[in-house]
């Protein structure tokens, strides 16, 4: 069955430190890949997405992610974390359910805490 | 509209009562999704509407849950005879189908449901 795994439930980093959030997926083909961020009491905001092409994807707020087919991973990175980045981060895959329709599977999320 | 809107933002109800949650998608978006997010959990897919096609109801947890989408726009998620385990945030997302590919979802702020 298709699945998305975010192995880190909580991550704490100091402001200015680098960040990497892990995401692994299980799917027979190359899926469409997404990272979303959810601030407290808010809906999900798209950070970046990978559909095809360059495997290093740039997103908003200084985030980037790299698709590694051999590892079935799509890890999210940021070189220098800001206090405002504290939030919950969700990795998701888009899978073709039937011809022309797509379903999305989300990981359980990683909650990021930023220390001043 | 400018984004996906959901109402009410919060709903407190008594066990056994029916509730209706509303979602207004982005104008022109043909696809609409409902998800449930329980405390500390990822997003659980509930139902998916795509244009005039029959909805994908495979994620609905029980026959107490139903949803409709009128005129290809506004959607209502109805939960009958609510139970305490229905307490969660219900998120709606809409997307515009891209030719031959998956779609980026845009999320509303959610409805926080508490069943007493």
Image (cartoon, rainbow, N blue to C red):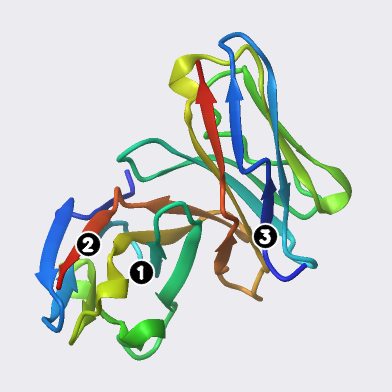
Quadrant the N terminus of chain A occupies: top left
The residue identified by callout 1 is A30
Residues under numbered marks 2 and 1 in contact, where contact means CB atoms less than 8 Å apart: no
Query: Helix or strand or loop: what does disc 3 sit on?
Result: loop
Q: Within 10 Å of the Cα at label 3, are there few (<14), some (14-19), or many (20+) other Cα atoms?
A: many
Chain letter of disc 2?
A
Q: Residue at x 56, y 47 (%)?
A: B110
Q: Quadrant of the C terminus of chain A?
A: bottom left
For numbered disc 2, what is the local secondary structure? strand
Residue placed most toward the observer, B4 or A75 = B4
Tell me where residue A97 appears, x and y as whole percent: 53, 51
The label shown at residue A112 is 2
- The chain to which mark 3 is attached is B
Whichever of labels 2 and 1 marks the residue nearer the N terminus, that label is 1
Q: Report how far apart the C-alphas of labels 3 and 2 lie in the structure.
A: 25 Å
Residue at the limit of the structure toward the top, as seen here: B16
Q: Are marks 3 and 1 in contact (CB under 8 Å)?
A: no
Q: Is residue A82 left or right of residue A58?
A: left
Are labels 3 and 1 assigned to the same chain? no
User: Between tags 3 and 1, which lies in front?
Assistant: 3
Q: Position of residue A42 (x, y in %)?
A: 48, 56
Q: Residue at x 74, y 61 (%)?
A: B30
Q: Which residue is mark 3?
A: B4
In the image, A1: left or right of B14?
A: left
Name the secondary structure under disc 1.
loop
Q: CA distance from mark 2 to mark 1?
A: 27 Å
């Amino acid at each position: 069955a298709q699945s998305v795994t975010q192995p880190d439930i909580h991550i704490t980093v100091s402001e200015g430190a680098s960040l990497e959030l892990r995401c692994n997926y299980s799917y027979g083909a190359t899926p469409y890949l997404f990272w979303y961020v959810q601030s407290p009491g808010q809906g999900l905001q798209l950070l970046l997405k990978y559909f095809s092409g360059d495997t290093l994807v740039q997103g908003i707020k200084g985030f980037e992610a790299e698709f590694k087919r051999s590892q079935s991973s799509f890890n999210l990175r940021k070189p220098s974390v800001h206090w405002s980045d504290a939030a919950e981060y969700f990795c998701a895959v888009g899978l073709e359910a039937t011809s022309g329709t797509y379903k999305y599977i989300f990981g359980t999320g990683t909650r990021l805490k930023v220390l001043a | 509209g400018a984004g996906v809107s959901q109402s009410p933002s919060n709903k407190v109800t008594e066990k056994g009562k029916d509730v209706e949650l509303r979602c207004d998608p982005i104008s022109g978006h043909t696809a609409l999704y409902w998800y449930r997010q329980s405390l500390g959990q990822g997003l659980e897919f509930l139902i998916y509407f795509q244009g005039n096609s029959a909805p994908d109801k495979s994620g609905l947890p029980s026959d107490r849950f139903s949803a409709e989408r009128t005129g290809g726009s506004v959607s209502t998620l109805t939960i009958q005879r609510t139970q305490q385990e229905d307490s969660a945030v219900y998120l709606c997302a809409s997307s515009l189908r891209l030719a031959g590919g998956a779609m980026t979802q845009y999320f509303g702020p959610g409805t926080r449901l508490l069943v007493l």
